[in-house]
Image (cartoon, grey):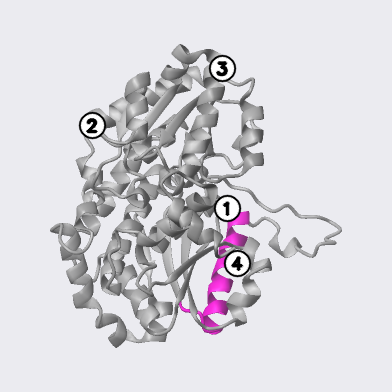
Amino acid sequence: MKTIEIDIQHALSFTGREAYDSLSQEAVKGIENLESNKGAGSDYHGWVTLPSDIPVSQLEDIKATAASLQVSCDYVVCVGIGGSYLGAKAVIEALDNSFASFMPRGKYPKVLFAGQNIGEDYMAELRDFLSDKRFGIVVVSKSGTTTEPAIAFRLLKEQLEKQVGRSAAKDLIVAVTDASRGALRTLASQEGYKTYVIPDNVGGRFSVLTPVGLLPIAVAGFDIDRLVAGAVSMMEKTRLASSGNPAQTYAMMRNALYRDGKKIEILVNYNPKLHYFGEWWKQLYGESEGKEGKGIFPAAVDFTTDLHSMGQWIQQGERTIFETVISVEASDRELRIPADEANLDGINFMSGRRVDEVNKMAELGTRIAHNEGGVPVIKITIPRLCEHTLGELIYFFEKACGISGYILGVNPFDQPGVEAYKSNMFALLGKPGYEAETQAIQSKL
């Protein structure tokens, strides 16, 4: 089976081989830290061996729960924020029909998302939409007190209980939470919800291969066995330090570019199904590396769409950027461009060619143009969009992230800056226990 390939030649030409090779010992140390459970943040290294550690019995139980929701629901709302929803949404969007949201229910329910914002109109419109629908809820929160999902879950739980009754609602709610602590664990025990555990040693942004991501993905009808198998395959490929380790190569190359003044990494895809994969990737690298005044800023674009908005800046803007391109080798469908006698649009020279061939030439032409315009380009090629390949890609980026963070000299597994906005928000809302903070912040207004 073909696997992920990485090409750094058009980035290496900017830094030189010596600068890249100089990071080898740091990368080896980073891999040793991850594999031997050492280094900063080692309490959160559970994801490193997670793909092979998942019991078959747990996968079977997740699939059974998904099957139950598939029978009972036309819609399942996944409630969560950050790593509690991005991984699931990334995989579902990559594998689903692009127009699934406009189609009537097929074999599987449609998975919707809530709790990833505090949009009043969004939640009101979601409640209106669900008012006459058969729906269930998968709520994902380790504590049960994170503001955004807590608000969404309270609103949706109330609505579900009104529509089907409290007794029936408990069979339509699944909680993915802490093993023994927290508000959601307490509520789930009181109400009798089916529950799954978020492992203590796996941080949210690394949790897509836990029930956090696996359950919504299974509900949507995708093969979580193949997803996990892909991750196991990449885990084996990246276990040892070597020049053939793709995660090591990526981590070293991006850090060599960072030390050369390239402070912004743009993840590029040429397949619109990968839009939310870029969103997942941004959280993974942004939260892992952006601390202590360090870190590459992660951005993502969808080409060729964004070439008509961001293309000018990328081609001729400040030269502090580099690109990482995810190139999908094969499409699932075949569509050829027809000839037109009038040829008013002037594209008859493309007649008979596949749409994907045109897309591939746009990809190649853009990489050449950007490279010549002073943008280093890393290319990651994946065979096609399927569960196995996405499992490989997820683990590849996770492993590279851990290695890269250690090369950078930060703890890749904490996020101390995330709480700052929450403290201010609670103070402004007058949350009990925040009286001093409320007084202090009001003096600034």
Q: Which mark is residue 362?
A: 4
Q: Secondary structure at mark 4?
A: helix
Q: Residues within 10 Å of mark 4 (few under 14, many from 20)?
A: some
Q: Amino acid at mark 4?
A: Ala
Please name the amino acid that badge 1 sits on.
Pro
SS at badge 2: helix
Q: Amino acid at mark 3?
A: Lys
Q: Please name the residue shown 40% across and 27% down the image.
A: 174
Q: Position of residue 181 (x, y in %)?
A: 27, 35
Q: Residue at x 55, y 78 (%)?
A: 370
Q: Are marks 4 and 3 in contact (CB under 8 Å)?
A: no
Visible residue check, residue 124 = yes
Contact? badges 2 and 1 (CB < 8 Å): no
Instruction: Give the residues in magenta.
Output: 354-376
User: Of marks 1 and 4, which one's residue comes earlier in the chain?
Assistant: 1
Q: Is residue 51 left or right of residue 436?
A: left
Q: How many angstroms separate mark 2 from mark 1 (CA)?
A: 33 Å
The x and y percentages for residue 236 are: 21, 54
Say whether residue 365 is left or right of residue 277.
Answer: right
| Callout 1: SS | helix
The first of marks 4 and 2 along the sequence is 2
What label does residue 298 carry, if any?
Answer: none
Badge 1 is on which residue? 272
Residue 8 falls in image quadrant:
bottom left
Which residue is labeled 2 in the image?
56
Name the residue carrying label 3. 162
Q: CA distance from mark 3 to mark 2?
A: 37 Å
